[in-house]
Amino acid sequence: MAAGVSVKHGLLCSKARLVYGLQRKISPYSVCIQRAAEIQSVRASTSTTGDSQHTQKYCLDMVRSRDYDGFLSSLLLPEKARRSSLALRAFNVELAQVKDSVSQKTIGLMRMQFWKTAIEEIYRNEPPNQPVSTELWRAVRTHKLTKRWLLRIITEREKDLDDRAYRNLQELEAYSENTQSSLIYLLLECLGVKNVQADHAASHIGKAQGIITCLRATPYHSSRRKVYLPMDICMLHGASQEDFIRGSREQNIRDVVYDIASQAHVHLQHAQSFSHNVPAAATPAFLPTVVLEDYLHRVRRVDFDVFHKSLQNRNPLLPIQLYIRSWKKTY
């Protein structure tokens, strides 16, 4: 009898513990907590996705409005490299516009210091809460980009804040190598290309791009009473800064433009001499050569009159020309 009571008591205790456990598992409080955690997780995921879309669109809009040629070239890159290319070009735009957007060199230096610090934080996986920095961090993580190229662009842009003309063509080439060529090296890394011949081609294309950018910007700079063209070539042809500020179209001004444009053409020829040894995977990074060739053709057509109005207009056929070059996988 005692044994029966003991067994019955044990069964009742086990049943009570089971019921109590079930009540704890399905209690309204526990369900609410679990549901709240799920909602919070979904919201966090949605927020992260939303932030990612925002930073991506920010860079895309910036490049489209400030570097239209680079924007078109980026759209024709393979999908795996497209977003990173836009991030790098947005970074380049951010640095390039510092010089024109600040009234004092000290402020410009502060902006450059921000980007130096941002790069260090990006490589520590602690990017600043800024759209371009966030996208650049993503590009660095995805493609293991070389920090040296990013810092070299900043350093060279920082030196350019001195706001003076280049002493000679070699100085302009060095600036172009450290800025434009460095950007192309990074684009090659986004494409997964590691090739010495491609690097040589990138170096020459970057120099040509820097030289032609300086020429293209001459009317804009002159309107602000600034001239950055190499002084040695200007002196060679007896052209003064005041001649450019007045928008002179005399023969000596055209001769200056001819000499500078010719050097850009030489660099493009050197770049093309490597084309047979450059892997096809690298050619999307060299699409800007289409833009450079187009400008050289148009400036030659107006007899090297850098102030001709037609040079300030976009070529409506440029997107088609870029697409054809992309399809052919040549440069």
Image (spheres, rainbow, N blue to C red):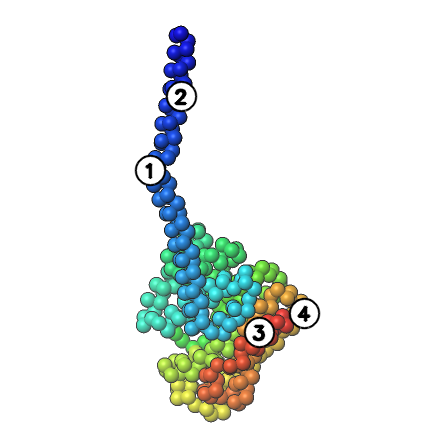
* Image spot of residue 103 (x, y percent): 32, 72
In terms of image quadrants, where is residue 61? bottom left
Q: Which amino acid does label 2 sit on?
A: Ser
Q: Name the residue under label 2.
A: 14
The residue shown at (38%, 51%) is: 43
Q: What residue type is labelled 3?
A: Tyr
Q: Residue furthest right?
A: 276
Secondary structure category for the residue under label 4: helix
Q: What residue type is labelled 1?
A: Pro
Q: Mark 3 points at which residue?
A: 323
| Mark 2 in CB contact with mark 1 (< 8 angstroms) | no
The residues tagged by marks 1 and 4 sit, at their Cα atoms, a distance apart of 72 Å
> Who comes first in sequence, dot 3 or dot 1?
1
> Who comes first in sequence, dot 4 or dot 3?
4
The residue shown at (57%, 62%) is: 191
> Who comes first in sequence, dot 2 or dot 1?
2
Q: Which residue lies furthest to the top in this view?
A: 1
The residues tagged by marks 2 and 1 sit, at their Cα atoms, a distance apart of 23 Å
